[in-house]
Image (tube, rainbow, N blue to C red):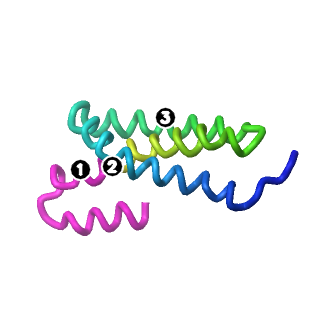
Amino acid sequence: MSKSPLFIVAWIGSMAYGVAMVLAPVSSSITNKYGPHISVGVGTIIASTSLLISASMPNVETMYGTFSVMFGLGCCLAYTPTMTIANDYFDRFVYLFLFSSTSYG
């Protein structure tokens, strides 16, 4: 097993975050169409599956697809509904809910 340069390995997590941010509008429209429970459930399944697949990858290059893209998509589907449904469930203290959900959880 050869060692990969650190800058190549660092791109895996950065791309996962980038995919999650780029696909946020898509996730928001999925949440509006199918509801937050479906979006979060599908996102959790995708993210969990990508972590299990990524754990058995033989080299770093294949993790770009399994971790960066799949995990980014799963996290996007699970995270974006918390921002879009906050006003539906909390009339007062929306800022407190958003702070606690993004900071601690």
- In the rendered image, residue 24, in percent from the top left (x then y), is placed at 34, 47
Q: Could you say which is closer to the camera, residue 101 or residue 75?
A: 75
Q: Residue at x 28, y 39 (%)?
A: 36
What residue lies at 25% left-to-right and 31% top-to-bottom? 34
Residue topped by disc 2: 80
Instruction: Residue 91: give x, y in percent of width and height.
Output: 12, 59
| Residue named by callout 1 | 84
Query: Residue 77: x percent and y percent?
Result: 38, 42
Q: Amino acid at mark 3?
A: Ile
The segment highlighted magenta reads 80-105
Q: Which residue corresponds to the image point at 52% horizontal and 50% vertical from the top-left? A: 16
Tell me if label 2 and label 3 are in contact, CB under 8 Å.
no
- Few, some or many residues within 10 Å of mark 3 (<14, 14–19, 20+): some
Q: Residues within 10 Å of mark 1 (few under 14, many from 20)?
A: some
**Residue at numbered disc 3:** 45
Comes first in the chain, label 2 or label 3: 3
